[in-house]
Amino acid sequence: MSEDSDLYPNRDRDGPPVSRRGFVAGSAALGAAATAGCSGDAGTGTETAEPTATPERRDTVLVFNTGDRTVSVVDATSVEVVETTQLGVTSSFPSNQYARTLVDSASDSVWANVGRGVRALGAYRLEERARVETGSGANWQELTPDGASVVVSAREPAHTQYRVDADPTSETFGEVTGEIDRTDEGGRGDNDGPGPCDITVYPDGRYAFVPDLYGDTLTVLDIEAFEIASQVDVAPLDGERAPQPWMGTVDPQGGQLLVEHRSGVETVWDVSEPTSPEEVARFTDADGLGSGPLTSEISADGSTGYVFTRGSEDVTVIDLDALEVAGRIDLGGAAFSGTWDPAHENLYVPVRGENLVRVIDHAAGEVTETLEVGARPYGATATRVVPDPQTPGTATAAASRLGFDEDGTTYCIGECACGHEL
C-alpha cells in the first residue's frame, strides 16, 4: 500500500460532479435512480416505497457491502443474517453512535456517507429521502442524541463542518442549518485546510469532537451555536513527527475520548470538561497496539475501548480504567469499522477481505459468532426496526431530471465499489 493510498482511494478514477447542496428526494423512484449502479444501468425493480407501512420492531444490524453495493440485514437477537439485498448504494462510515436507539420507526432515517456528501435513507425501505452535497468525497457524520440534527465533517477540498436538520417532522428536514468553512486555518505542508476527519458527539449533545488530519489538532464544536468552542494541539510523535489524528470516539459516559492517528498511534483524552480535552495516554506498537488503527468503539460503561487495527488484522482492546492495552482479538482479516447492536452488548465487525462479520461478545471478550455477508463488507450501523430494502428500479428519466447519469459511492480505505474524487 502506497503512502497516500489510504487518503486517496481510487484517485485515478473519475468521480461524479458536485451537485446541489440541499436536496430532498420527491419519491422513492428518484432515490433509486440517484443510487443506481456504477455502469449507469439502473437495473430493474420496484420503484415505489411504502411510507405508511409499519416495519417490524426488532434489534437489527445493517452491514453495507462495498464490493457489490448490497446491504446485509442481521437479526441482532438471534444473531443471524435475515437477507442480503441489492441496494445500489453503499457506505463506509454510516452514522452509528446514536442511530442504534434513535432509529425505531419507518419515519426515521439512517444517515450515511455516499458519493460527495451524506444521505438520509428511510429506515424501512432504505430509499433516499434527502441528500447534502458537501463538495468532498470524504465525509463523516453523526446524529445528535436527540435525533434533531446530523453533524458532518467534510475533509478536503471542502474543509467544512455542516449541521443538517434530521427531524423527519421538520419543514426543513434534510437542509443545512449551520456551516463552518475552516479553510482559513490552513494545514500541514501544502494542504489548503485542516482536514476535519471524522466526528463524534458528546452524550449530552452539546458538543462534538473533530480530529483534524492536516491541522494536527482536536477541535471541539458547539453544536447549538455551530461554532468552534475550542481547539487543542495534538503533540507530535518523538517530539517532531506529525501525529495526524483522523478518527475518534467519545465514550457513552462522556469521560474519555479515543483518537486514532494515521501515524499509527492511539491516544486517550480526558473530556470530562468537553471544551478542555487533555491527553492522558498514548499507545504504540511497543505498548501492544496493533498496526494501522483506523476507528474505534467503546463499551456502554466506558471501561473498554475496541480499536480496529487493520494492519495486524485484529482488534486492539484497551482498558480505559487502567489506561493500558489489555490484549488483541484476532479477526482473520482486516476490519475498518464496526458497530454495537442496539443493546450495546455485541460488537459487529465487518471483515472486508473475507466477506464475513465477526461478532465480539463484550462480556466474553471474544468472537462468539461469524456471519457470512455480501462482498467486501465495510460500514455498519444498527436500528430497532427490521428494514425491507427495495432494489433499485429503472428510473433513467428521474436520474436525468436530477442532473446526473451515474452516481459514485463512498469514501473508504482502499478500492470500494465505484471510484470518486475528493
Image (spheres, rainbow, N blue to C red):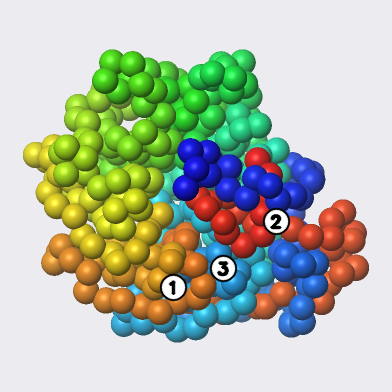
Q: Residue 335 got which mark?
A: none
Q: Is residue 343 rendered to the left or right of residue 124? A: left
Q: Amino acid at mark 2?
A: Gly
- Identify the residue shown where x is 57% and y is 59%: 416
Question: Looking at the picture, does residue 192 appear above or below residue 171?
Answer: above
Q: Which residue is mark 2?
A: 408
Classify residue 323 by image quadrant. Answer: top left
The amino acid sitting under disc 1 is Asn
- 382 with respect to 279 (left or right): right
Q: Secondary structure at mark 3?
A: loop
Disc 1 is placed on an element classified as: loop
Q: Position of residue 29 (x, y in %)?
A: 78, 71
For the residues bearing labels 2 and 3, Cβ distance under 8 angstroms: no
The residues bearing labels 2 and 3 have C-alpha atoms spaced at a distance of 13 Å
Label 1 to label 3: alpha-carbon separation: 9 Å
Give the percent coordinates (x, y) of residue 391: 67, 78
Q: Earlier in the sequence, mark 1 or mark 3?
A: 3
- Please say if the residues under marks 1 and 3 sit with CB atoms less than 8 Å apart: yes
Badge 1 or badge 2: first in the primary sequence: 1
- Sort mark 3 into few (<14), some (14-19) or many (20+) by Cα contacts within 10 Å: some
How would you rate the neighbour count of disc 2 (Cα within 10 Å): few for under 14, some for 14-19, many for 20 or more? Answer: many
In terms of depth relative to the viewer, which is nearer, 20 or 187?
187
Q: Residue at 45%, 77% (x, y): give it.
A: 373
Residue to which mark 1 is pinned:
355
As drawn, the label of residue 67 is 3
